[in-house]
Image (cartoon, rainbow, N blue to C red):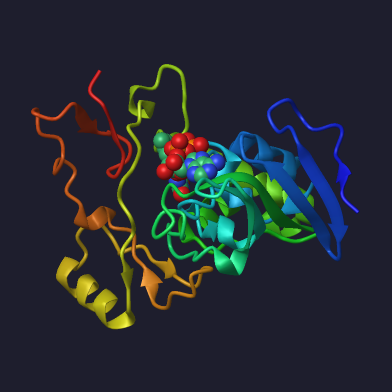
Amino acid sequence: MLQRLLDVTADVQAVMVEPIPAGLRVQVAAGADWDALVREAVDRGLAGIECLSGIPGTVGATPVQNVGAYGQEIAETLVSIACLDRASLERRPFRADECGFAYRQSRFKREDRDRYIILEVTLRLRKQARPLLRYAELAEEVRRTAPIDALAPAAALGAVRNAVLALRRRKSMVLTVGDPNARSVGSFFLNPILGPGALEALRRRLGTMDGPVPTFPADGAGGVGGVVSPPPPVVPKTSYSSSEYPWVASARHRLEPKTRT
Ligand SMILES: Cc1cc2nc3c(=O)[nH]c(=O)nc-3n(C[C@H](O)[C@H](O)[C@H](O)COP(=O)(O)OP(=O)(O)OC[C@H]3O[C@@H](n4cnc5c(N)ncnc54)[C@H](O)[C@@H]3O)c2cc1C
């Protein structure tokens, strides 16, 4: 039986929770602020979305591009969503396996673009679960800043959230008053998914230019094989900063254009 969680913050209204083995099923209204939900989950020791800290936007938008960061994506914890079909005006539920999730993809961005309005998102969050550190840059930051292996699971989640936010701040990827690099116009780059052969070929071509090519396994919900190789070493800093454009490359993050003024 679902019960309303009464003490949620004003940012995360309309949350329903249902205890399940090893965790909670959490049903959240689409209009809730995503990062406020992540913060609430981490504060309550619930694992599954901690690496998605600091991503701007609403809960309802997260399934559209299968929001992901630092080795985690929403498809991993998503149980189902409830939509309004704009054609029939009927309510239409989708299980996670019906959403067509892949790397930054879903049916709502492809074949059903603009057909459904997502009303609610239901996630399965785990209690007493240790965070997964799949992304080398994050694992390094967490180990540098907290005795992660000695921490209880709930405290370890907090350490991961802090590390993600610190990394994002360093790249000006969270809104920070007074930081001109945080005037983001959004990022339109996707990491290429490479098979082992293509990755080796890329490594050979780049040599040691800009350090080793960072990679992590692409074994997310899309069931994609191979590895994801973030493209920073391949994208020249100035490639899209011509003076004829109203944007410039961020000084902190090569893949994040910002407004000129
Ligand atoms: C600085 C910065 C950092 C970012 N970092 C990341 C990141 O690390 N990982 C990542 O995946 N994304 C990232 N993003 C992209 C962005 O935060 C996400 O795509 C987020 O989900 C957008 O939320 P929104 O509510 O603003 O949606 P919008 O941008 O308003 O909408 C995005 C799309 O979803 C559709 N949509 C939104 N809500 C609904 C709904 N309820 N029902 C149906 N369709 C809907 C819209 O029609 C649109 O097509 C970043 C963006 C910025 C600016």
Total numbered circles: 0
Q: Is residue 4 above or below residue 65?
A: above
Q: Position of residue 240 (x, y in %)?
A: 15, 40
Q: Position of residue 152 (x, y in %)?
A: 80, 54
The answer to whether residue 47 of the structure is visible from this angle is: yes
Q: Which residue is depicted at the point 54% across and 64% down?
A: 134
Residue lying at the far front of the rendered structure: 88
Q: Quadrant of the C terminus?
A: top left
The answer to whether residue 56 of the structure is visible from this angle is: no
Q: Which residue is depicted at the point 87% across and 50% down?
A: 2
Q: Quadrant of the N terminus?
A: bottom right
Q: Is residue 186 above or below residue 122?
A: above
Q: Which residue is depicted at the point 15% across and 70% down?
A: 205
- Relative depth, front residue between 158 and 85: 85
Q: Position of residue 245 (x, y in %)?
A: 14, 30
Q: Is residue 217 left or right of residue 211?
A: right
The image quarter in which residue 214 lies? bottom left
The image quarter in which residue 198 lies? bottom left
The image quarter in which residue 78 lies? bottom right
- Relative depth, front residue between 74 and 214: 74
Q: Position of residue 87 (x, y in %)?
A: 50, 48
Q: Is residue 9 above or below residue 126?
A: above
Q: Is residue 60 left or right of residue 247?
A: right
Q: Is residue 242 above or below residue 75?
A: above
Q: Is residue 149 left or right of residue 96?
A: right
- Relative depth, front residue between 193 and 102: 102
